[in-house]
Image: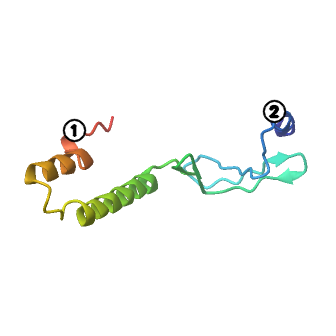
Amino acid sequence: MLGRFATECEAAGISISKSEAMVLAWKKVECLLRVWEEVLPQVEKFKYLGILFTSEGRMEREINRWIGAASAVVWVLNRSVMVKKELSQKAKLSIYRLICPSPMAINVG
C-alpha cells in the first residue's frame, strides 16, 4: 500500500526521499514500514511547519519550546525597547500588555 502511495506522490512531483515514520502510542512501539524495498526510519519526534510532534503525543516539549521563544522575545524587548527614555511609561506598559497578555485572557480550551 505504501508503494502505491509513493508512486502517486512521485507522479504528482512530491519527493518522499526524506520520509520517516512515527508511531503515536503511550508505550514505545516498533513498526517497520516499507516503501518498495526501503524501510522507513522510525523517529521519536519531528518538527513540521514549526510544530514539534512526539511519539507519545504529549505537548510538554512543544509548550516548553514556545515558552523559551517567548522568553527570548521578552528579553530582547526589554534590552532594546523598554530601556528607551524616549518612550513614556504608558507606551511601555501598552507594549508589555501586547506582548505579555494576562494569563486570565489566554484561552487554553
> Which numbered circle lies on residue 10?
none
Q: Secondary structure at mark 1?
A: helix
Give me the residue at 84% from left, 38% from top. 10
**In front of the other: 48 or 79:** 79
Image x and y of residue 73, in percent: 33, 58
Q: Which residue is mark 1?
A: 105
Residue kind at label 1, given as amino acid type: Ala
Q: Secondary structure at mark 2?
A: loop
Q: Horizontally, is 75 left or right of 17 in the view?
A: left
Give me the residue at 31% from left, 63% from top. 76
106 is higher (above) or lower (below) than 100: above
**In front of the other: 3 or 13:** 13
Q: Quadrant of the C terminus?
A: top left
Q: Horizontally, is 31 left or right of 108 in the view?
A: right
Q: Quadrant of the N terminus?
A: top right
Q: Nearer the viewer, mark 1 or mark 2?
A: 2
Q: Which residue is mark 2?
A: 12
